[in-house]
Image: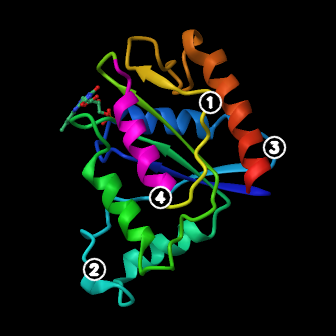
């Protein structure tokens, strides 16, 4: 593929709605695009003492991100922010100072929540973090999804009610990546 997108899911839960959403979008990848989830559940907690002497899983995580052209964060909202596991992964990728693997990669954020705010506050917090890390996150269209019956079809694809909306978002995302990668 011309563009490999690093998909980072902010939930470690086995039946995560956000991972289901990520998987459904992966299957909608257009020509020239590959969406690849990069695991964050094996990362140790970030410790600045390890800068430059990272354990193998951290090196591997950083190399995987570095090898992609774009980013996609699919995350739940935890207590009105991003989950700690996601922030930990972002921190791991950001150091040593001057060696961030995030800088300049175009990205987007989306998320599913059981609550009506649909991860809006978590997404705003992530925008704050990624702006500092020099990641251009697509501004529009925003995607705040509430987990409801029928969100996913039986085969794991996006249900009829949201399919057109997600497809329209994906078209804009692909264009965003092509313009900024
Ligand atoms: C939540 N949840 C939640 N939902 C929300 O809309 N706003 C919030 O601030 C929070 N806070 C929160 C904190 C913690 C610690 C948990 C475990 C959960 C509910 C959340 O939307 C729900 O658990 C989702 O199912 C999480 O996403 P995954 O794991 O299904 O992808």
What residue does disc 3 label?
31
Locate residue 10, reporting x and y percent: 37, 46
Q: Residue at x 49, y 61 (%)?
A: 133
Q: Which residue in the structure is indicated by mark 1?
A: 140
Dot placed on the residue nearer the N-terminal end, 3 or 4: 3
Ligand 1 sits in quadrant: top left
Residue on which the image places disc 2: 48
Mark 1 and mark 3: Cα distance apart in space = 22 Å
Magenta-tinted stretch: 117-132
Q: Residues within 10 Å of mark 2 (few under 14, many from 20)?
A: few
Give the x, y percent position of residue 15.
Answer: 32, 35
Q: How many numbered marks are there?
A: 4
Nearest to the eye among marks 2 and 4: give it: 4
Please say whether residue 120 is one of the residues in the magenta stretch. Answer: yes
Q: Earlier in the sequence, mark 4 or mark 1?
A: 4
Q: Quadrant of the N terminus?
A: bottom right
As drawn, the residue found furthest toward the left would be 79
**In whole angstroms, how far apart are the C-alphas of marks 2 and 3?**
40 Å
Viewer-nearest residue: 19 or 126? 126
Is the residue indicated by label 4 positioned so its CB lies within 8 Å of ligand 1? no
Question: Are circles 4 and 1 on residues that touch, CB within 8 Å?
Answer: no
Q: Nearer the viewer, mark 2 or mark 3?
A: 2
Element at badge 1? loop
Name the quarter where the C terminus is drawn.
bottom right
Residue carrying label 4? 132
Q: CA distance from mark 4 to mark 1?
A: 19 Å
């Amino acid at each position: 593929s011309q563009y490999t997108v690093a998909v980072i899911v902010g939930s470690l839960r086995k039946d995560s709605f956000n991972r289901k959403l990520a998987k459904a979008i992966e299957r909608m990848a257009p020509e020239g695009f590959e969406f690849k989830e990069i695991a964050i559940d094996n990362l140790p907690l970030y410790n600045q003492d390890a800068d430059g002497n990272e354990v193998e899983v951290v090196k591997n995580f950083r190399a995987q991100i570095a090898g992609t052209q774009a980013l996609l964060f699919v995350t739940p909202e935890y207590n009105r922010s991003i989950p700690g596991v996601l922030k930990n992964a972002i921190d791991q990728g950001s150091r040593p100072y001057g060696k961030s693997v995030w800088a300049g990669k175009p990205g987007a954020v989306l998320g599913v929540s059981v609550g009506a705010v649909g991860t809006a506050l978590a997404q705003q917090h992530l925008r704050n973090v990624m702006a500092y890390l020099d990641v251009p996150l697509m501004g529009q269209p925003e995607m705040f999804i509430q987990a409801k019956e029928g969100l996913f079809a039986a085969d794991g694809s996006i249900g009829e009610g949201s399919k057109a909306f997600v497809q329209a978002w994906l078209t804009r995302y692909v264009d965003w990546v092509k313009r900024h990668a």
